Image (cartoon, rainbow, N blue to C red):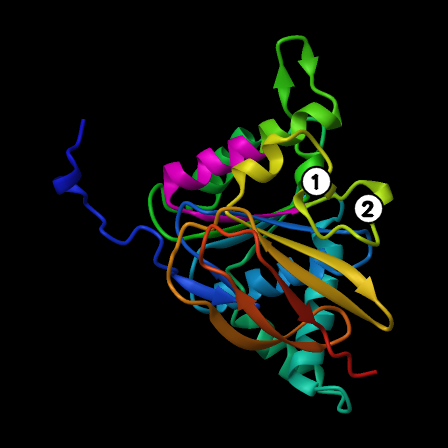
Amino acid sequence: MPRSGTLGNPQPYTPFGVFAGLSFWGGGLTLLAAAPGIGKTSWLLRMIFESACLHIPSAIGCYEHTPEELRFRLFLQTEAMTGGPHTQPSQPVVEAALARASEAVLLSLNSGEDTVRALEDMLIHDYAFPVKGPALIAVDYLNRVPVVGLTGMMNEEGRSGEAAAALREMARHHGWAIIAAAALKSERFNDGDDLSALLGDERVPYEADPCVGGQPHRRCPRLRLRSAGSPNPQRSHRTRHDAGPCNSGANVSIPRSKRNSINTIRWHCHE
């Protein structure tokens, strides 16, 4: 067993990148929880796009959308980013911007058979993701990830915690950063600003590092960020980005402590 004086990495929580306003470090699991239609998939796609532009291995595994649907959403996002709210860019300009993220992997997963282990094998053996090293993996979404128990496929209530634990283990084993969209309980769609609003058993919030929660607010979404044990004690990182289907901008503050503080993220839509 290693002694305390022989640690190989004295700063294991150092971020390897900030994508769509969120910091990611190797071995971390982030949950993105919000009601349906708030823009979780679009935000995940933006993260993957920015990561792939920096030539970091990046993938999104989606249990709800086909690769064609994901590509179409990514095209619309890139079109909005290159043209802005009042300009229609030409298709060659959009295609050139998309080409910068051509190495991003868009996967359509089956909720009946594509387990976390299957996703792990697919990324390493089919897409040459590093066995150990920085990579960004997005999963859409946590509660659809299949988990096989002793008596067969587990139900949604029980499998969410197991899926979160498996994703966290995969992140730690390979040094990848993983972010997974997570569902809220239906009765908490409008006030899901604490960890008890997450759908699934009590293991779901325990397995995550930061947990990002969002809820609608008037014309624009209002996103709240709750820390679920983010391990890095460094100061908050602030950035500005355009994200979401409405080409919005947000000032994002990521807490780095283990406190349960809530920060508010407002998306300013340009309609």
Residue extending farthest to the left is: 5
Question: Height in image: 118 above or below 12?
Answer: above
Q: Residue at x 82, y 57 (%)?
A: 37
What residue is drawn where x is 77% and y is 79%? Answer: 269
| Mark toward the start of the polypeptide (2 vs 1) | 2
Question: x%, y% of residue 175?
Answer: 37, 45
Q: Residue furthest bottom?
A: 86
Taking 157 as reference, is 170 left or right? left
Query: In terms of secondary structure, what is the magenta stretch mainly?
Result: helix
Q: x%, y% of residue 197?
A: 74, 43
From the viewer's side, name the closer residue of 141 and 196. Answer: 196
The amino acid at mark 1 is: Ser
Q: Which residues are magenta?
A: 164-181
168 part of magenta stretch: yes
Q: Amino acid at mark 2?
A: Arg
Residue behind mark 2: 188
Q: Can residue 76 be seen here?
A: yes
Nearest the viewer among 50 and 66 is 50
Looking at the rendered structure, the secondary structure element under dot 2 is: helix
Residue 111 falls inside the magenta stretch: no
| Image quarter (top left, top right, bottom left or bottom right) of the C terminus | bottom right
Report the residue marked by disc 1. Answer: 196
Image quadrant where residue 139 sits: top right
Q: Position of residue 99 (x, y in %)?
A: 55, 71
Q: Residue at x 75, y 61 (%)?
A: 39
Discs 2, 1 touching: Cβ within 8 Å = yes
User: How would you rate the neighbour count of disc 1 (Cα within 10 Å): few for under 14, some for 14-19, many for 20 or more?
Assistant: some
The residue positioned 57% from the left and 68% from the top of the image is 20
